[in-house]
Image: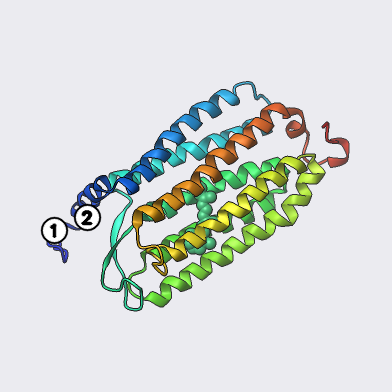
Amino acid sequence: MAVATPNGGLPLQVTQSEVFSRIQGDVLLSSSLWANIALAGLSALLFVYMGRRVSSPRAKLIWGATLMIPLVSISSYTGLVSGLTVGLIEMPAGHALAGEEVLSQWGRYLTWALSTPMILLALGLLADVDEGSLFTVIAADIAMCITGLAAALVTSSYLLRWVFYLISCAFFAVVLYALLTEWASAATAAGTGEIFDTLRALTVVLWLGYPIVWALGVEGFAVIQSVGLTSWAYSGLDILAKYVFAFLLLRWVAANEGTVAAPSTAPSTAPADD
Ligand code: RET
């Protein structure tokens, strides 16, 4: 027997087709999703082309991780646009929109758990960090995304939404700390300091934008109540943090493969050839 929901329908199917037509009817919202599907598709093709001559194992690994970024993105945005990974969430007492059903794009947080580790894997390989550090930072990053998903989906308590948000921020602090300290010195030793600094600045600044958008958007303090605007804010950050980031990284790797291919354990024997 099907379980009846407050809106009188079958739980998942009804919500899915309902949010699908809502998304189609909102130009701002649907354009924020379709723009990314198109850009991710173009980026994937471009990245395949850019990496066609890369042959050393390390450079290939960076290329593979980088290529996964737009590929995960296409899947993520198709999930959002179809309504599969979007849901109507009833906000708990205390929230600015308490008792109202808010459109949550929870699929974003879920797929970040796949795309952000690829970004960090590529950055970690570029900086030639040790495996322990790479594992710790990627594990903290995945935990950040999953607890961010929890923050968005908790409907029982307003306080607990923010508790999950703060837990997610704590994991994020681990990622930021590593990028700003240990990984930066590893990159200098590996001869990739200059490009790492550029990509790190891009990453740190843009990634800080995500928790800010979450806090200001409908899932947080609801300062921005338009789901279309919130979605464009995330989509804009994604365009820069994923496709522009990946393009700069691959362009450098393709032009400086010798530096990246150098053995990782002997920084003194692998000077920068710039
Ligand atoms: C959330 C909310 C909870 C607190 C924090 C967050 C951080 C999210 C970040 C996302 C980065 C996403 C990227 C995606 C590219 O595919 C989950 C918004 C700290 C940093 C770069």
Spot occupied by residue 52 in the image (x, y as percentages of width and height): 59, 22
For the residue marked with disc 2, what is the amino acid? Thr
Q: Residue at 52% x, 70% y: name it.
A: 166
Is 18 located above or below residue 74 in the figure? below
For the residue marked with disc 1, what is the amino acid? Gly
Q: Residue at 35% x, 78% y: name it.
A: 94
The residue lying toward the viewer, choosing from 28 and 56, is 28
Spot occupied by residue 140 in the image (x, y as percentages of width and height): 58, 58
Q: Residue at 72% x, 51% y: name it.
A: 183
Corner quadrant of residue 189: top right
Task: Tell me the number on the disc at residue 15.
Answer: 2
Task: Tell me the number on the disc at residue 9.
Answer: 1
Query: Furthest residue to the right?
Result: 268
Q: Secondary structure at mark 1?
A: loop
Spot occupied by residue 30 in the image (x, y as percentages of width and height): 32, 45
Q: Secondary structure at mark 2?
A: helix
